[in-house]
Amino acid sequence: MISDDANQHRQATVERITQQIPRHVLAHYPTPLMQAKRLSETLAGTQLWLKRDDLISFGLGGNKIRGLEVMLADAVAKNANWLITGAGVQSNHVRATAAVAAHAGMRCTAVYWGKPPAISDGNYRVTQMLNSAFHFTGDDDRASVDTHIHQITAELREQGDRPYAIPRGGACAMGVLGHVLAVFELYQQCLAQSLEPDAIVMAVGSGGTYAGWLLGLRLLNLPWEMLGYTVSREPEQASQQIADLATEAAAFLRLDWTFSATDTPVHGGFIGQGYGIPSPEAAEAIKRVGRTEGILLDPVYTGKAMAGFLHGLRDKQFDDYQRILFVHTGGEPAFFAGNGEWLNRTLRGLNNQ
Ligand SMILES: *Cc1c(COP(=O)(O)O)cnc(C)c1O
């Protein structure tokens, strides 16, 4: 186990950095850290652990709440009365932001790419129920969300409101800091449970979560490898985005640390046909984890990351690792969007490779 001296130093860092990060706590922490025992029995000697951020007890949970807790503290400090953010209609981040706004007594505007969908289900329905205003960019380019967020923020300010703009997917320095705190939380749990993971697996979307975890691991000087699986951008693009976000968040902590894409490797190959489109590999991984652990992964993020990780294991990429921690970042509302044909195909055996 990590030496006592090193741990005393780490505790001091945890205390010092925690004080620098504003946070409005919305849920009960720590989230469970548990071994996936039955699944591990099928992994030829690898012990798999799960950090259950899907169980974050606010607004249907997921990793986005951690980032939003820091943004909310910042928004309140700036006397904001309106949160504005965006992504696709099934976004977990937008749903979580709408819940945060409701809780804080603020208004919320959700900016979505494309046109309004014919039916309201999954996260979209929940976001509607939470009383968010909607704005569709009419453009299928995901980046169209960014310019519309700016426009709407300016309009709100002009009409006398006090908007707080949150970038698409919640990827900003404030959000990253929320994930730094997740590493501090995990570190305490690992000490208590005498667990030293060799590597951390997670899905990579806009990259803020990975950036925060990496920064947290660096701050505590923990030698745990990051294994990120991109579910939207190409790996090179994702790496660069993560490096930029980590550098920006480090600067907020007054650290002169620069991250580059080589510090933030990302695995590719498991996006399938595109962001948000369930893949047969993800469906298989979801079925396998569901049937061994009774735990639901989601088809957009964690299912694809698990598919990539299980493939890497079979491919003997992780033979040096004994204990691996998978961060379950949430996303289950996606089960209740669409007709579920992606899952039915797997259950009927139509996707058997
Ligand atoms: C957003 C999200 C991620 C990825 O987090 P990023 O910070 O965008 O990389 C992973 N899992 C779920 C369920 C998410 O909603």
Image (spheres, rainbow, N blue to C red):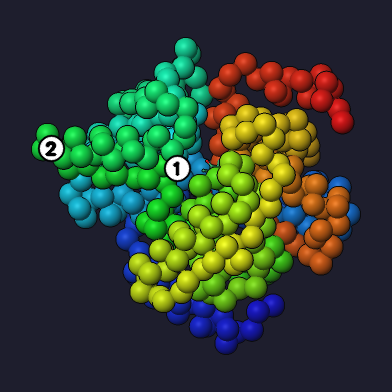
Q: Residues within 10 Å of mark 2 (few under 14, many from 20)?
A: few
Viewer-closest of 348 and 245: 245
Task: Name the residue carrying label 2.
Answer: 158
Q: Which residue is drawn at 46% across and 17% down?
A: 117
**Circle 2: residue type:** Glu
* Location of residue 342 (image quadrant): top right
Task: Name the residue carrying label 1.
Answer: 169
For the question of whether residue 163 can be seen, the reply is: yes
Query: Viewed as shown, does residue 328 lie left or right of 349?
Result: left
Nearer to us of marks 1 and 2 is 2
Q: Which residue is drawn at 74% across and 54% down?
A: 48
Q: Where is residue 280 in the image (x, y as percent from the top left)?
A: 75, 30
Residue farthest top in this picture: 118
**Circle 1: residue type:** Gly
For the question of whether residue 193 can be seen, the reply is: no
Q: Residue at x 82, y 25 (%)?
A: 351
Q: Quadrant of the C terminus?
A: top right
